[in-house]
Image (cartoon, rainbow, N blue to C red):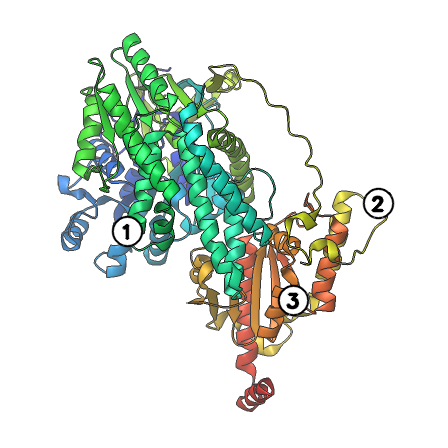
Amino acid sequence: MPMAAFIQHPRLSAEKVEARAYQIEAASDCLGSATLLVLPTALGKTPIEWMVIAERLNSIGGRALLIAPTNALVNQHLNDLKTVIAMQKSDDSITSMNGSIDWKKRKIRWDSAEIIVATPQVIRNDVKRGSIDLKDVSVLIVDEAHHSKGSHAVAEVGDQYLQSAINPLILGATASPGSSQEQVEEVCQRLGLKRIHSRTAENPLLEPYAAELEIKEVNVEVDEGLKLMSEPLVLWLNNLVDQLRRLGYHVQAGRVTSSQLNDTRERIQRAISKKEGLAYNAARQCAQAQRLLNLIGYLLSQGVAASREYLERVKISGEGGDKGASLFFNDQRILNLYEILKSSPELHEKVERTIQLVQNQIENEPSSRVIVFSHFRDTVDEIVSRLNDFSAIQPERFVGQAKREGSSGLSQKEQLLVLQRFRDGECNVLVATSVGEEGLDVPRADLVIFYEPIGSEIRTIQRRGRTGRHRDGNVYVLIAKGTRDEGARASAASREKRMQSVIDRVRRKMGRPNNDDLSKHLTSFQVINDGKICSAFSFMQSEKERLAPQLGQRKNRISISTEETRDEKPEMGQHSEIDPRRLRPKGQTGLDSFPSIATPPDVEIDSEEREHGLEKIAIRAADEIVQALTTEALDPLAKESEISCQIIVKDSEFNTSIAANLRKNGLEIDIQKIPIGDFKIGDRVLIERKRVQEFVDSLLEGRMIEQANRLISESERPLLLIEGTGLFSQQSVHNNSLMGALATLTIDLGLPVITTKDSEETVGFLIIAAKREQALLGALTKEARGRMNIEKNI
């Protein structure tokens, strides 16, 4: 690693911020325009935030606001900023705000501070209350920016800031923005970010600072006693799913999964909205099936303590008025299992393996520190209790603030004390739930143990980032053989692998701002290196030249190995074709019943050409309505941008990005329970939105025609909107059958169909449609509108 050089700046304390070329480069980008900063954990996103804050206060003035998701992170940022920022006023110029402080006192703090660190919920609520104003905030730092989605408080603060600030600049920082293009684009959209600055640990500018990280997967056998406990639950689950399948709500074959049950629940909800009598009982059965699947998973992959805690939560929900939870818990099979779990010691081998790993680490390196992550608080308590038996091990539990039956939470003050004890070496093992995953800088966490793999790539990256922060580290992931653990591990690995390519794709799509000159944002920064002072820009350029030849020498900072040898499972071959009639009740119409506009099977057509041709045919019937909604030939529509529009949005769409983006674009949103359709524009236009997979599923189930007829009967101008790509790339259905179904909808029934690429295009279409419809109605005379109403009533 090169000799330490330091950043000099009028608003940074001397020799507090190490000069690293990649951080200088990132700070320049972030100062140039609103930026999503994506760097690996432990490689220094925070110093970039410091530099951006310092420069904005120096050049623009006003205030700086940093929001972080947890109180522990808020406190950490507060202490760091007090150390590195050179304040021109009193120490009170840097302050923090959280929910434990009365809002009137928070207002006093806000008014007197130049830098504020807070949780997003506090800022959102105080802005709504009117006690604080964001207009003079010259920079908003969003730490752990991947939370900026949907109705999350972080996203709402972003909206408030962009609407209020006179001279806004946003920096969103994260190591894991998401594994899908839609997720990354939503983060950027909600925060108004114009570019992405992303670097991997293999970048030559980062390599000298990146610690090695070794991940070892430990395969653990499931205790026979736990398998025995789960067997009656598996039989019960299979019986429930079989009933749902016979009713036509559960269409997938094979092993039952949570995603399958989620799809089943959505189908049942749609059936309930149509007042189908059987759907209500099916909803109860589906909820019981999900509880059973969770319980089986916890028994086999987590053990006794986690399963006991899960059942206690179900019990509390039942006592609180949840009839389904009460019915489930009071079933004699569950009551019997609960009594066994209450008196049973922990049977899962994971606990023993965790104790062994911690003990070996402390024996080999007495000064080292270990973090153990577990999803359940009861498991945390069990591990801490077992570790207390060893004199060399000083464990501490690190959990959230909520109090639960038999388990006390930790207050904010207690959380901070635990972290400080861990940093100071007074305790050497931290056993934590998810509250310890994000952002916390725990120096020299030499070993991290995942009690279970996490299916989310975001949480996996955050957990793993608690080690290897300042020197090489190890991660052990405990995987129970033949359980949901194996699926979670594979899911997280696949999503993480996909994440970087998604980031690159969105970054290229966004491009870089015009006239982008790195040097112009760095004029106030200098670097002192070995007693010599140079400009930050020249230091960055010289480091690039020095380190460029090292590109690719260290291919991968993270290595993964398996501790135990396992029998390799054969690769899954192509799915065998299943007769769709087996997956629906007798007599129900399915996709195979639709007429086919067949192409001879022996004629090969280029797939891209075929998809283009099929899509052209499918949307031909919708051309008239699209033209009516998008043409600019009519004079009454010339001033559509000045028209105030309202869209009625179905309550189930309230928390989606579509509703938020419609509101952001100035449309009035009215949330209602619409019996059919998802969006209603005026009295005439009713739009049903279906994602590609939902559309295909509804056809496979034989429900699409009935839904289409209801949509047509409920509206003068019905429209089916299919959102997503790959409509004609489905494995489960032949394109000819799919086109036959579309022809039936558009030609036989006269239902216009339009496709959009993603939610962003859907929002754009809804905005245009609303403005066109409102403009057309506004242009009609009072007499004409009266005739329309009379004709409608007739």
Residue type, label 2: Pro
Identity of the residue drawn at 49% across and 17% down: 562
- Give neighbour class at mark 1: few <14, some 14-19, many 20+ (Cα, 10 Å): few
Q: Which residue is mark 1?
A: 319
Frontmost residue, 90 versus 713: 713
- Tell me residue 486's x, y (percent): 50, 28
Q: For residue 336, which quarter of the picture? A: top left
- For label 2, the SS is loop
Position of the C terminus by quadrant: bottom right
In this rendering, the label closer to the viewer, 1 or 3: 1
Frontmost residue, 209 versus 601: 601
Estimate the spatial distance between the alpha carbons at disc 1 and disc 3, rounded to whole Å.
53 Å
Looking at the image, is mark 1 or mark 2 earlier in the sequence? 1
- Give neighbour class at mark 2: few <14, some 14-19, many 20+ (Cα, 10 Å): few
Q: Relative to 162, is 419 on the left or the right?
A: left
Residue type, label 1: Glu
Residue 677 to residue 216: above or below: below
- Tell me residue 488's x, y (percent): 48, 32
Position of the N terminus by quadrant: top left
CB within 8 Å, label 1 to label 2: no
Residue type, label 3: Val
Q: Which residue is mark 2?
A: 601
Q: Which residue is mark 3?
A: 626
Q: Relative to 153, is 427 on the left or the right?
A: left
Identity of the residue drawn at 48% across and 57% down: 281
- Tell me residue 614's x, y (percent): 75, 53
- Tell me residue 289's x, y (percent): 47, 45
